[in-house]
Image (spheres, rainbow, N blue to C red):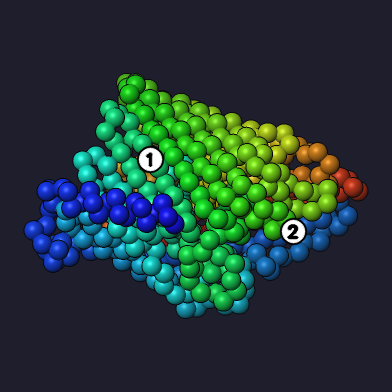
Amino acid sequence: MKLVKLSVVTMLIAGMASCSFAADTLADAFKNGKVSGELKVWYFDKDTEKLNSSTSPTSVLKDTAKSGDILNTTVVLNYVTDAFYGFNLGTTIQANAAPFVDEEGKEAYKDDMYGSGAVLSEAYLGYTLGKTNAKIGRQFISTPIVNGSGSRIVKESFEGATIVNTDLPATTLMAGYIDKFQGRTSTGMGETDGNAPTFEKRAIFLGVSASATYKFDDAYTVAVINKSIPNLTLTGQYAWAGDVNSGINTKDVDIYYTEANYVLPLNGFKLGFDANYRGSKTDLISGTGVNVIGYDGTQTAGRISISELAGFGAAFTAATTSSDDAVIAGMGNGASSYTATLVKASSPSLRANTDSYRFDFTYDFSKVGVDGLKTILQYGLANQDRVKSATTSADYTSYAAGVSYAVPALKGLSLELQYEKQEIETTRYSNNTKFTADLDELRFKANYKF
């Protein structure tokens, strides 16, 4: 926290030294502030069935802990003051209620959707000087390896400090300090009261878990994005998190990320070529006995895509992880991997000794006169070979579809429907038995931004 306090003092001195500001008085800065918001109504429904295909092929068991439905309603309100001597204040509150959820739905969605109440997700002091922007306090962060996901009704957030500079030609530099994290529900933050989440010194470390949070001390990150070469974007990021506690041991975690994105414009369509190499270095472990999982791993991924071909698009993505250790993708569920699927996301592809693939097919109906309507079909695979002396491995097959509609008649209103069926086959090597599970999840989202 000494670093944050020093940054506040530095910003205040710099702001007083600057003679350029938008508002004439502090009162005008508040009067001229901007209010925006969003109303959300989301319905999620999932069902999980388990089958022991080796010993009882006709016995299907419903997993009640992972089956249920929930209807959420949320109001998001954002207020940002006008600039005064380069300074501004920003706040965002997320207030969520699930009035009709039953006990089954509460249990099924306790980690990510059931958490009634309100949380002040953003409360920051910002400062802009030339091409440098700094924020201190609670804020949404969206970078490759520090990224709060918005795929659930309450968006994840961070507390700390960030600074972004664009003085260098075609280059963005970013540095950040993370002190606390806000997840999706209080249960996901280590509580059991079913309320809205709070900011705590614990966070999602995607790859270790996508639902449970783990205590950490402080975290730091630096990133660079360069677009000097036409049509090519190069990205690099590094993050360090101190004293991460997996419940088995407590270790520092280093996470790194590199990416290259190239778009080749052609006559009537575009080709995309993307490559990504990421990894984590740590002695952190989870699990017990022969099923201990290490996270000193890497992942290499690539993607080839075609877009804007008379409204059609397609992509093929492949990724492979190191043979002995899993990969920590980053802090927050937004630190997604290339082969993350539409609903079930990244976790299967980050396991050790896993090859994963994804096929995407998209269509934009505006090409036939239906503005705002888009669709996607997706097929994903994540196949794990045996790791060290582990007793099990698992393969995942996913079929997903989605349709979104930005309603032209009412600006700000969007509707989205997503569905994914995931089949999991687990092999137990001690007695050569196989277990399968079918996971079906439907999501409907109605959002109105104002």
Where is residue 359? Give x, y as percent.
Answer: 54, 36
Q: How many residues crowd around disc 1 within 10 Å: few (fewer than 14), some, or many (20 or more)?
A: some
The residue at 26%/33% (across/down) is 167
Which residue is drawn at the image coordinates 41% and 25% (left, top)? 262
Count of marks overlaid on the render: 2
- Please give the name of the residue rendered at 81% of the width and 38% of the height, measured from the top-left corner: 388
Residue 21, given in percent of the width and then of the height, sits at: 13, 51
As displayed, is residue 69 above or below residue 402?
Answer: below
Mark 1 vs mark 2: give the one in front. 1
Residue 235 versus residue 101: which sits nearer the camera? 235
From the viewer's perspective, tell me whether residue 391 is left or right of residue 28.
Answer: right
Q: Nearer the viewer, residue 243 or 93?
A: 243
Q: Earlier in the sequence, mark 1 or mark 2?
A: 2
Figure quadrant of the C terminus: bottom left
Q: Position of residue 60 (x, y in %)?
A: 77, 61
Question: Which quadrant would residue 192 be assigned to in this image?
Answer: bottom right
Query: Three-letter amino acid code at disc 1?
Result: Met
Q: Amino acid at mark 2?
A: Lys
Q: Secondary structure at mark 2?
A: strand
Label 1, label 2: how many angstroms apart (C-alpha)? 45 Å
The residue beneath circle 2 is 50
Taking depth in this image into account, of 305 and 354 the one nearest to the observer is 354
Q: Quadrant of the N terminus?
A: bottom left
Task: Determine if residue 449 is in view.
Answer: no
Residue assigned mark 1: 174
Front residue (pair 384, 137)? 137
